[in-house]
């Protein structure tokens, strides 16, 4: 399948991996929008939240546990952080493989300004 995130999950495209297990991989975003900006994805190809099936929900729960642990390790718990998953064309999804953006770090504040 010609999916960039499947290729990252398979190690066919290099990425800055920060966490990996059997079902999930997390890596830094290529074009960071915050001092800390990483993505957490299932290794299984799932297009978006809109195409989740009931059997996928364990993985989604696991993804949130991974987000929580990485965010804590990176010291994001004190000030907080943002988690975003864009869905489809109007949601601004550019890579059609389910992913959760995690944004935070020094100087990051939402909404800005
Ligand atoms: P979306 O717009 O689909 O919610 O987000 C896709 C994200 O994936 C973007 O923030 C983009 O910078 C990131 N991205 C796209 N291709 C690659 C890649 O090959 N490697 C990494 N690390 N990030 C990517
Ligand atoms: Zn994929």
Image: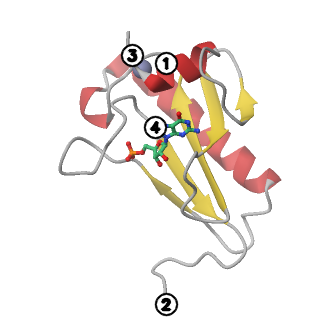
Of mark 2 and mark 4, the one earlier in the sequence is: 4
Q: Quadrant of the N terminus?
A: top left
Q: Are marks 3 and 1 in contact (CB under 8 Å)?
A: no
Distance Cα–Cα, label 1 vs label 4: 11 Å
Pointer 1 residue Cβ closer than 8 Å to ligand 2: yes
Above/below status of 95 relative to 67: above
Above/below status of 14 relative to 64: above
Q: Are marks 2 and 4 in contact (CB under 8 Å)?
A: no
Q: Secondary structure at mark 4?
A: loop
Instruction: Please tell me which residue is depicted at 73% across the width and 45% down the height of the picture.
Output: 69
Q: Secondary structure at mark 1?
A: helix
The residue identified by callout 2 is: 113
- Measured as percent of width and height from the top left, residue 59 is found at 51, 25
Q: Are marks 1 and 2 in contact (CB under 8 Å)?
A: no
The residue identified by callout 3 is: 55
Q: Quadrant of ligand 2?
A: top left
Instruction: Please tell me which residue is depicted at 31% across the width and 21% down the height of the picture.
Output: 53
> Is 84 on the left-hand or right-hand side of 102?
left
The residue identified by callout 4 is: 99
């Amino acid at each position: 399948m010609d999916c960039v995130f499947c290729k990252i999950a398979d190690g066919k495209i290099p990425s800055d991996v920060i966490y990996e297990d059997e079902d999930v991989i997390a890596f830094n975003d290529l074009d960071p929008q915050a001092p800390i900006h990483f993505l957490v994805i299932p290794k299984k190809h799932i297009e978006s939240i809109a195409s989740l099936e009931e059997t996928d929900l364990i993985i989604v729960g696991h993804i949130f546990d991974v987000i929580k642990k990485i965010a804590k390790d990176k010291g994001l718990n004190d000030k907080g952080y943002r988690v975003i998953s864009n869905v489809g064309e109007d949601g601004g999804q550019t890579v059609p493989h389910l992913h959760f953006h995690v944004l935070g770090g020094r100087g990051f504040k939402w909404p800005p300004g």
